[in-house]
Image (cartoon, grey):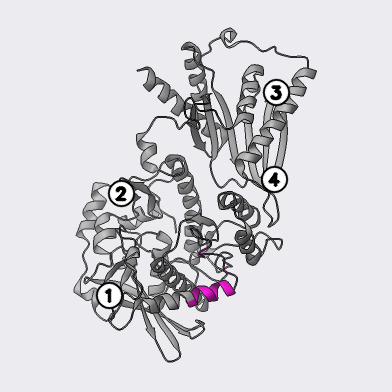
Amino acid sequence: MSLKIITPNLVELPSNKFPREIEQIAKKLQFTDELFEHREEVSGFTVDDISSPDLDDAIHLRKTVNGWIAEITISDVDSLISKDSYIDQMALDRVASQYFGDFKGKKVIIPMLPKVLSEYRLSLHEAQLRPTITVRVWLNEQCEIQKIALAKSCLRSSSRMAHSDYQGAKIVGDPGLPMNTYLEFAKHLATRRWSQGSIGMQSLRPGFTTDEEGMIRQGSVSAANQIVQEFMILANTSVAKFFQEYEQAAPFRVHMAVDSHTPTRRQIIEEVERNSDYLALMDNLRFIYNKYLCGALYQPETGEHFGLGVDAYLHFTSPIRRYADLVNHRIAKALIDDTKSPYSREEIVQICEYLNARLRRLQTLRSIKSGKHSFHNYRHSSVPTSIHQPGQKPPNGELDELFAFQREYRIGNITFELQAKPGINIELTCTASARFQGKRYTESFSAKSDKATVKSEAARRLHKKLGQIVQEKTFLDKPQSENEIPVLSKPTPAGQLIDYCRQHNLSIPIFHYEIWGGGVMPITCYCRLTSEKTVTGYGPNTKLAKSAAAEKMLAYLKSQSS
C-alpha cells in the first residue's frame, strides 16, 4: 500500500472547512434500504456532553442471573465511507478531529469528516435509524469477561442523555432499567481495573483525574462520565482480545515501560495520594512518565498498555472522530463476514507509522497555535501576554536581577531546563545556563517544590557564578552601551526586532528559554522588553521558538506605534 496523503508535510493545522468538492460528495452519500437488511436491531442510548455535535456510540446493559450482558453500539462509518475513497483519503490526511477550548460558549472544532456526515448522517440521533456495529460482552458477577461477540446491527437510539442530566436513579431508554444500575456496573468495572494495576481513568481528590495513560488532569468526572468511560474501555479491550484470538494485525494502542526500573502503578498512585500540591505534581509527574514510559502509540500487534493495566487495547468506539477506529471497524466487519481483511499487514504497519508521526505533529501544532490553551485567542490577539501588571512589583526578583546582569554584560541567551529526577519521590530540577565569551556556564538546583521556586534559585546561583567570572576574567570584548552598538540589517525575525528597537530608542529585547525535559511539549521562548512587556513563543526547537516570540513582539510594537 502507498498512502495517498493530500498534504504530506503537515506545517499547519487543517482548516475546519472542507473543499467544496468534498462537501458535495458528502451530501450525496445516503443510506439504502439494502444496507439495513440482515442487520439485528439493537437497543441503546447515547451519553455525551450537552454540546457534543457528533454522537458515535450508544450503550445498553442487561442484568442476568450469572452477571451482565453489556452492549456498546457504534456508528458504522464504513457503511458510507469506503476505503480509499476521496473522503476516506481526506479523513486519513486529518487523522482525527481536533477540539479546542470554548469561545463564547462554543467549542472550536476541526472535524475529521464533513459536518453533514459527522454531525447528521452518521451520528446516532434519537429515534433515527442508523447502521451500526455492536460489541456484545458477557461478564460474570465479578465483571470478568466470559464471552465476546461482534455483529453488524442497526440502532434507533431511545434517548440522548447529556452528562449533566444524571439525577440519581434517572430512567433512560428501558423504563425498567434505572441509570444507577449502569453506575453500579461501571464502578464494578473500574474497581476490577484498579485491582489489576490500572492507573488510567481514575478520579483522585476532588477536581483531579487521570487520563487513559495515567497522566493527572484537572477536572472532575461525573457519574455519567464514569459510566461512558468504563463502557468504552470495555469495548476497546474486548475488541482487542477478539482480534488477538484471530491473530489479526490491526492498529493496536500500546503504552509500554522503558525498562524494569519503572515505578509500579501502585507506587505512582500512592505518591499522587500523598502529594498535597497537585499543581506542582501535574508538572512533575509528566516527566517521570517521560523518563520511564514510552509514549502511547499504534503498532500492528498487541502490547502492554501500562496506563490501563491491560495486555491488549485498541481504539474502536470513535470512528467519526479517529481514523484508527475506522480502520479497526473495517477489519472487524471482515471478521464478522468471515472474509479477508481489507488491510495487509504491510498496510497496517504503514498506517501505524503514519498515524504516530501525524498525531505527534498535530499535538505540536496545537500547542504552538493555541498557546497551550486557546485556539481562538491565538488567531485574533496580537497583544503580548504580560507576566506582570504595570506598576506591580515583579515577583520574580532573582530572574529580573539575572536579566539586568545579562543586559549589562551582554551575556548570551539564558536557558532554563526543568526535569523530574528519577524515582517516585518527585524532585524537580531546574538547570540555568548562559553563554559568556565563548563558554557556557550552568547552575542547577533541585527541590521537592514548585517550578517557580526551583527556577528562581537556579537563576540566583547562575547570577552568582557569572558575577564571579566577570570579576576574574579579562574582557575579550568590553561591554558597550546600547547607543554604541551599530545598527545592522539582520534577516532573522529576532534581528529585525532588535533593529526596530534600536531605531526607535527602545530597550534591546532579551530572549530566554524554558525547556521541559523529555521534549514532549514545544520549547518556550520569552521575549522581554521590560518586566511588563513579555511575549511567549513556542516551537519544536529554540530557533523557531525565538522566531515566533520575536514576530509577536514586533507585530505588537508596530501596532502600538500606528
The mark lying in front, picked from 2 and 1, is 2
The amino acid at mark 3 is: Phe
Q: Are marks 4 and 1 in contact (CB under 8 Å)?
A: no
> Is 195 rendered above or below residue 423?
below
Task: Name the residue that disc number 1 marks.
Answer: 155
Q: Which residue lies furthest to the top in this view?
A: 484
The amino acid at mark 1 is: Leu
Q: Which portion, as a residue range, is magenta? A: 188-204
The amino acid at mark 2 is: Gly
Question: Around disc 4, counting alpha carbons within 10 Å, would you say few (fewer than 14), some (14 to 19), or many (20 or more)?
Answer: some
Q: Which residue is drawn at 60% across and 59% down?
A: 272
Query: Which circle's residue, 3 or 4, is located before the other in the chain?
Result: 3
The image quadrant where one finds the C terminus is top left
Marks 2/3: CA–CA distance: 50 Å
Residue 105's mark? 2
Say which element carries label 1: strand
Query: Which circle's residue, 4 or 2, is located before the other in the chain?
Result: 2
Query: Which circle's residue, 4 or 1, is located before the other in the chain?
Result: 1
Say which element carries label 2: loop
- Nearer to me, 474 or 122: 474
Is residue 340 shown to the viewer in this render?
A: yes
